[in-house]
Amino acid sequence: MRSTFSQSDSFSNRTNTGPVGRVQWDLKLKVLVCLVLVLFFGLGTRLFYLQVIRGDEYTLASMEGIVKKQNLIAPRGEIRDSRGRILAKNTPNYCLYAIPSKVQKTRSLDKICSHAQLSPTDCQAIASKILAVPPEKKENEILLLERITHDQIALLESNASALPGFHIKVQTSRIYIAETGHNPEQAGIDPCNRGRKETESYGEYIHNQPDICHFSHILGYVNQPNSTEVDAGYSPESLVGRSGIERGFEEQLRGKNGFEKHISVPGQNKKLDLLFLKMLEDQMIEGEKKQDSIPGNNVILTLDSTFQKAIYEAISNPGFPAASAAVIEVGTGRILALVSRPGYNTNLRQEVIWEKAMLENPYQPLKDKALREIYFPASTFKLVTAVSAFEQREKNLFQFDPDQQIFCHGSYEMRGKRFGDHEHGLVNFHQALVRSCNVYFFQMAEQLGLDTIAETAKGFGIGLPLNLHMGESKGIMPTKQYYLEEHPDHQYLPGQALNAAIGQGEVKATLLHMAMAYEAFANGGTLHQAWLVDRVETPKGELVFENKPTSRGQVHISADTHERIMRAFFQVVHSQKGTAHKALIGTKKEKTIELSGKTGTAQLGKNLKNSHQDHSWFIGFTPAKKPEVVVAIFVEHGGHGGETAAPMAYKVAQRYWSWKQAQQKKGSK
Amino acid sequence: MISVSQLRKQFDWGFLILILVLVAVGLVNLYSATRAVQGIGLFSKQLILYLVGFSLFFCVTILRLQWLQKYAWWIYAAMVLLLLLVLLKGKVINGARRWVELGFFQLQPSELIKIGLILVYARLFSGDSFDLEFRPIPYATAWHLVWMFPVGLIMRQPDLGTALICIFIAISMFVLAKLRPTLKLGILLIDGLLATLIFVFGLNRYQKNRILSFLSPQNDPLGHGWHANQAIIAIGSGKLWGKGFLQGTRTRLRFVPEHWTDFPFAVLAEEWGWVGGCVVLALYGLLILWILNIANETRDRFSKNVVFGCVALLFWHVVMNIAMVTRMAPVVGVTLPLMSYGGSSLLTVLVALGLCMNVSIQNRKAT
């Protein structure tokens, strides 16, 4: 600058540039040229650093986020009843999503509330959900509302242009329907189980769905996988069975998810040309592009939903809302009905308000009183004690004459300890069983000992797993060893055998345990595996596997023993002195159904004794001579077994026969 | 006026060819940049703008520079008025009020003001040499006022990138002007101090964050540093030879947002690699040196100053843009001359190049 300025003609308007023609570069310009060269060299070096030195690193980074793997969720298998009627299936669940970065906060939020006809609380919930998203996650979609109705969808779709950032996605959820008619039109007429109208959304549907209560515990429920399950291979969008058949047959029902890899484009850009995308796909996707999902298999139950519902209704008694019942086919172990009252509407399970109501309900609807809750079997256990005694007698290990009478004066004393009962006077084995005389069985037990009884009980499956994989309980059958392990501080008392003999003490079993024990007795001693699932089929109807009666063990029961006990069981119901004679009250003699069985009255622990009635049991067979089915009833706080459980059992037996008749009619048609 | 045959003889053909080569590279690159996302629409619009731009270029080429010198203040005033108009009636895009709707295209007066600044400064610093030497204070004051007023208006839009370019042009021309070096140094030091104060207290948060995030862009990958990071990934993945024409996945999938306006160099570097990037850098370097040579050859002080202004405009646009794209400078939205999509920027650059061509022709005429 100085150089230019200090030229001789500095006061003229022209610069001094030497001779005309090739002009010399003055110093100022030379400096400028150097500056330009240095800066451009610097930029070139920077590019060299980025592209050549760190090129590989950035190439890796450039692949990131372009290829997305999308899971193709395998449709979960259906659960059907024995006649093929759908009990559980998948249904589209329309969900409202938003991408927070695209939502115009105030305007869109107001609009979505009016367009989707949202309640003010939902509206606020949505607003806070969107506002709570941290800035780095604003590009990710978030779930706002589930189960939106068809009306809402229509309104949202027609106003889509005014609602940028919002979109609707279809997800799958599970719906439990328990249809009772084959024909969907008939199902629509059925007051209890309306068929689903095509126009109804999932949300409307489950609220209109009055009752699938007779299946709630059997079917169970599903929900989203937790993080450990996701790590173990579950896709976050899939569903996992949590209880009932959904849990027990998870592996069959879930199917196998597939995947699809595709090029993902950030943001709203949907205008990419297809050829370019295709090229990218070929270039960037390694390995298989797509793997189809394999849909889950259908599980077909042994239960007929008509019959299941009939049984559910048969054991309803406003005085005793908590009860359970099982009907088991004798000779196979097939479960024909298995209900627990009160049931609940599985479809409402996700709703917090509903769940709270269920947990506060004194009759504990969520508890499965047939499979998961264990109780003292009480006098129904006397079958086991009796079979044990006869078995020992045959082996000449135990002397007793079933026809000899003993005198029952209402209590039994053993080593200074008194075991109480009602007074029955002179009773032989038959009378003792019919009238449920504890003293007679105390006497037996004292000589048999706890371990002998426990041995027989094990033969009947009591205290052993039921192997249904539905979260059922194992029950408890104590032995001497058990007492020593469980209560090491107390000395084992031989008196425990007496308690066990009448199904008290520490003997605990589920309803199904007892039902299966009676089934084993009825068929002559074969303990069957109880089965609830008839077969598993692929969605196309190919058989995956079929359940057949399987034996889990054998109890030795001689013909004489069988005959004696059967006779007594018949008298329990049909004689005036029988504990269950009240079951026949109000029935006409000529139309009486043959029902035999044993009552039970389970005494409660000390803390409940004063405030609650005892639990009531009845387990029996129909018909009495050559039993077809076992009928097992349990009534929580039902009082005496003969008072509540036995009349219910009679009703159940009635329902069984009328159902069977209807079946035969259908068959002959 | 000069005859056509004279013009042909005196025309700086090498300069024109250099410009046309850059234009061709820019168009090819723009085609790639806009094709995947916007179809052919943006590209054809830009082609039309090139036709308009080159007409303007030739008009400016044959214009009498004395006329421009005479009316420099009026041209400047008209452009400042346009800037005022923008603030009053401008169209808002992406939160900034920068555009005046002109039917088929939107004019960005903040681009045009650069030409206004160049002309005014060229005239200011080509005044009486005696004045320049012995009464520098009024000149320095005028210098300040001339850039501060439009820059203030541009910052209101807000458009940090253009404001910075205007300041850089002003400083460059001030430094190159015929004033006492000690005076220049003193004034620039005081201005630097003031600028620091303005940054701390004057900028709004959005502008400040953008500058600050440049310093540590890894900290907020989806925030303000997002553009810079994505551009770097695109450029880096181009490696030595590039991915090939139309194969730039990163830019075409719009990981680099709006890549046809502020980030065309990322597209180029991704598709043509380091080699392509260097060729384009060399072309720009050559262009700038060519113009510096024109400045060197000219004897008229006004013309010289005009050429200095134009070269400053080009230089700062190229350097700022590439520095911004390669994360050496904050992402402030500066276009890359002849490569970016956008009419106002293109017209401004072509007018500047036209002015240089004009001076070059004058030089040849003189010989």
Image: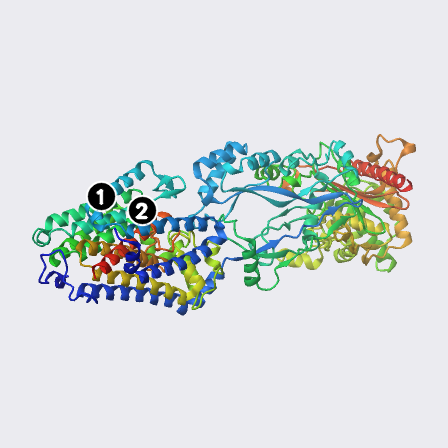
Q: Is residue B237 above or below residue A506?
A: below
Q: Is residue A577 above or below residue A564?
A: above
Residue A488 sits in quarter: bottom right
The residue pinned by badge 1 equals: B149
So how many labels did they put on this image?
Answer: 2
Q: Earlier in the sequence, mark 2 or mark 1?
A: 1
The residue pinned by badge 2 equals: B159
Q: Is residue A376 above or below residue B362?
A: above
**Quarter occupied by the C terminus of chain B:** bottom left
Identity of the residue drawn at 50% across and 57% down: A65
Instruction: Judge from the rendering whether residue B229 lies leftward or rightward of residue B290; answer left or right.
Output: right
Query: In the rendering, at what x and y percent does residue B5 appear?
Result: 30, 57
* Front residue (pair B57, B130): B57
Query: In the rendering, at what x and y percent does residue B116 appear?
Result: 25, 47
Residue B253 visible from this viewpoint:
yes
* Amino acid identity at mark 1: Phe
* Front residue (pair B279, A77): B279
- Badge 2 marks a residue whose secondary structure is loop
Marks 2 & 1, CB-CB < 8 Å contact: no
Label number found at residue A255? none
* Amino acid identity at mark 2: Asp
